[in-house]
Image (cartoon, rainbow, N blue to C red):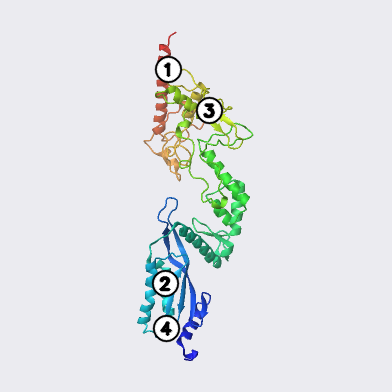
Amino acid sequence: MDNADDERVLEIESLQAIYSDELTLLSPFSAKIELAVALIAPLRIDAGNPEDVREQSVSFLPSLHVSFTLPDGYPAAPPQIQLHTAPDRIPRDKIDALLEAVITLWEENGRSLVMYDWLSFVQEQADLAFGLSVLVVAKQLYAELLSFNYTASKDNFNKASSSCGICLDDKRGSACHRMDHCHHVFCIQCLRDYYNASIIAGSVHLITPRELLQIPLERPAVQRYVDIMRKKKLETDKSTVWCPRKWCQGAACDNNYPKLDMPLSEMDQVYKTASTAPGLPPELNKMEPPNEEDELTKDKKYLADQLCVCEDCSFAFCKLCKSTWHGEHYDCRPRTQSVAGRLEPSKEEQASRDFVALHTTPCPSCNSCCRTHFCYLCSGWLSPTNPYAHFNTRGTPCFQRLWVLQDGDDAQAQVEFGGARGAEMEACGIVTADEERRRQEAMAEMPH
């Protein structure tokens, strides 16, 4: 048969025109094609749920490898096809179903040219993830699929054009960066200018060092970002103990945010919250030792736990008195007369507590700092948009008392508080009077 009349030639030429970059001719009537897989919807993958691997999703899968031969007599005889993936990630029953589909299509088409129709069918099934809702793979393949998905997503992004959300210019994807968390797109130059200025000013926001290097920022700037984040965490953590040396001021080794020794490119999170990070147990922050059995042993253990070592200068010091470590045999805790087996605070410490209770009001929402608007007189919540309505409401203890305390803290002793604040002040007075009564009773019972 003349090649001009051979339908196999027409089939091969048609496929070469359609798959010009993907098709490689092996012989006049055999070839191989790589079909890229861009999923219509993300596919969940997991590694059998091992404890150290979490489930993730991918939008790209490695290409399908199709090898085929058009035998003599084609299309009267069906094509000979091999289909596989590298790595082997598709269940065998899905592969067999795709291979069986070529015979079905060949029969439905009246045993005519079928390769293009079958390749289109395979591409459609691949883009639909072969009907899978989750792909369970081995741990090694799990990492390979995630790596391939990242590379393919990056290549696909680089080939397209994007509009920068800061300067609003349209630029090639290779000159832009898509944020990992929110997927917003900005040009690299704008991101560099923004993050470099923020890091220099010490105003940092939640972004991983790994992504800063991907933008990319210079490594010294990223290291400064990590250091600033850690410093902010340590400064806001009340359990942090600082080195008493004025020229050092480093944090003690047993803090909730230890220095990270992993490479910056592997940091997906700078520092977790103190509640999930290793650190000092709560009992170490208590000033009073437990008054249970074997009091002496527990007291010595408590004193021994006050040893702190600076992570910067290695200075060993006492957590309580901030002096050079003196050992657990010396009790440096401030104390006065013991009442009912309980250590009383010193006069200075008690005066400080009384001043705080009298002259300050904790936030009724968080007892810390959350920008909640509240009334200092009654601890009631105030509307941020119209806080003055609280002082204009008849029947409330704060009605027409907006200017109370305008003279400062000196006039506070004569102010009548209301609401939760008033109850708090009344409770403080009761506790103070009760403690004074018990102290006087204990002093009276002591032998003269």
Residue 320 disc label: 3
Q: Element at badge 2?
A: helix
Q: Which residue is mark 1?
A: 439
Q: CA distance from mark 1 to mark 2?
A: 85 Å
Q: CA distance from mark 4 to mark 1?
A: 104 Å
Q: Earlier in the sequence, mark 4 or mark 2?
A: 4
Q: Is residue 204 above or below residue 179?
A: above
Q: Earlier in the sequence, mark 2 or mark 3?
A: 2
Q: Which residue is mark 4?
A: 113
Residue 124 disc label: 2
Foreground of the two, 322 or 390: 322
Residue 60 disc label: none
Q: Earlier in the sequence, mark 1 or mark 2?
A: 2
Q: Is residue 353 visible in the rendered structure shown here?
A: no
Q: Element at badge 3?
A: loop
Q: CA distance from mark 3 to mark 1?
A: 25 Å
**Image x and y of residue 163, in percent:** 55, 63
Q: Element at badge 1?
A: helix
**Image x and y of residue 447, in percent:** 43, 9
**Image x and y of residue 165, in percent:** 54, 60
Q: Earlier in the sequence, mark 4 or mark 3?
A: 4
The mark lying in front, picked from 2 and 3, is 2
**Image x and y of residue 264, in percent:** 57, 50
Q: CA distance from mark 2 to mark 3?
A: 70 Å
Determine the residue positioned at 40% across, 12% down: 445
Q: Residue furthest right?
A: 247
In the picture, measured across the screen, residue 317 lies left or right of residue 296, that is right
For disc 1, the neighbor class at 10 Å (few under 14, some 14 to 19, many from 20) is some
